[in-house]
Image (spheres, rainbow, N blue to C red):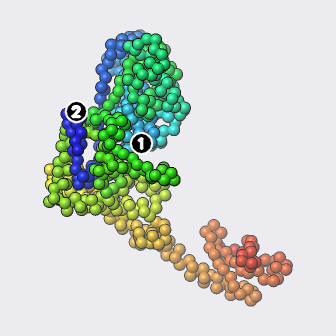
Amino acid sequence: MSLEGGGEGILDLATPGCAFFEFSYFILLLLNDQNSLFFTRINAMSNSDKKYLSISDSLRNNTSNSKESNNADFSTEADEDVTSLVVLSVIFQGHKMGAAYYDLDKCHLHLLPDHVETSASYSILRLLLKQAEPCAIVTSCRTDENILSILKQINNVSRPSESTNISFMSPPLQDKLHLLPGIDFALEACRHRLQNLDLPNMPKNMNDVERKIYFSSLIDFTNMCMVKAAGGLLKFINNSPFGPCLDMESKRVSSISTLTLKNVVQIDENSFRALQIFQEERHPSVYKSSSGIKEGLSLYGICNKCKSAIGKKELKRWFLLPSNDPTLLKERQAAVKYFISSKNADVMSTLQGSLKHIKFLPRIISRMKTAQASMNDWQSLYKTVYHAMLIGEICRSRSSSLEIFNQISVTFSSDLFRIASLLNKIIDFEEYAKQNHFVVKPGVDSELDKMKRTYNGLPDFMTQVAYQELQDLHPDIQQCSVIYLPQLGYLLAIPATDEMKETKNYSIPNLRFMNWMLFLGIHFVIFMIKKHK
């Protein structure tokens, strides 16, 4: 099936070539390629933009003149290179990201429709930050910590940017990251703020219904994350003073435009349903309606022959963000042509056999960092590395005309072999399964081996201790038990004699009384063995 967008086919896929999808995603995870997408503006600046831009320019000139009067060595060339004052708002909801940013110089509001952000590196967010270069970032206080760390890392939000003229900002705004209460991003309130904007070129004296219709022609309100981001941004701008040199007129939104990803075809939800690209089916039972969702008869369901979960996830992202980049499409079509060829059937079968063992590593590694990894996690890590090494060997031995083979050959280096050998050398998976905890093979660490021998010999040693203690006890005592606690030492448990029960005297030479307990109807007395302490 072929869909046309921008003069180039966005999809020309054959079912047997779906192994290629998984190659691409796995290689992208390792390459962390963030240079394949760029943001571009689709709306030109209106005349009203120029009007407010001139106001902002005059304000800049006034500020630069005041600085020159206070500092004779001040260079006027620095003012000409001042970065635009941009405030960015980002909202995440599930795997969707919506954003909006406001240019204080141009009084222009830019909206980024909702995009599915499934990349572990948050590539779309990174590219948005790279283009907007915001002087302040606004988001909800409920935002995930991973996203906040990216905002801090990329934009150096701990301090103002050196290229930004911070004299236009008040002291609160010099802290670049602003976490607002979640109520500021309430959907209905944000929609109401957008519909109550007073744009210069909009008709006058419109009622509420007419305003709703008018702004629906400018903004797609079905993009909930985008609407929340824009509404929260408007409230932040209206409530935050931007210094004495910017009046309320400079904060007024003069125009609205939409951002789009370069070389990506924009498709709304209605088009997805009409073209039947995705079709979710729910289980007919009301008890399984929440967990019984599956893909029905759809284009994605027909093309989805991926063997790994991350391959299916990446294929879905490709359908959600179809590309019209001719170079990328030709590379994909060349790979599909290679895999549907009957002479390459063995290669595809071997690759699919390895791909089904590839797991999503970021989630596994995060559990390992917190010491919460299970045996399945360690086995999944080993299998992923081992089969990735096999995939690399296969790609290096095949045609170098395919770009995906070249990328895999370079990325899947000898480091994979080293990692796989280390995992196999250190972890004893057989003992792991028996003991249900992490087990290191003998010979890896001599100190650990010594501690294991001591631990494994404790039962025999404690039996000897119990036998020795029993020889020193009163003849009336016929049995005893010895346990070892690192905090207390060796403890001796003996049944209480009739004399102990009558006199309540539990003293025994060379033993220190600790406590008594009733176990299975038998009165036991606990002592600490002094000479073994």
Which residue is rendered at x = 19% and y = 46% of the image?
333
> For residue 133, what is the image quadrant?
top left
| Residue type marked 2 | Gly
Which residue is rendered at x = 38% and y = 32% of the image?
113
Above or below, 319 against 58 in this view is: below
Question: What is the number of the mark on residue 95?
Answer: 1
Residue occupied by mark 2: 6
| Mark 2 element type | loop
Would residue 330 be found to the left or right of residue 510 on screen?
A: left
Q: Is residue 90 visible?
A: no
| Residue type marked 1 | His
Q: Quadrant of the C terminus?
A: bottom right
Would residue 175 be found to the left or right of residue 269 on screen?
A: right
Q: Where residue 286 sits in the image (x, y, percent)?
A: 50, 51
Q: Where residue 47 sits in the image (x, y, percent)?
A: 33, 13
How far apart marks 2 and 1 lie (CA) works out to: 27 Å
Question: What is the number of the mark on residue 214?
Answer: none
Q: Is residue 145 visible?
A: yes
Q: Quadrant of the N terminus?
A: top left
Q: Where residue 531 sits in the image (x, y, percent)?
A: 67, 77
Which residue is rendered at x = 48% and y = 53% of the image?
285
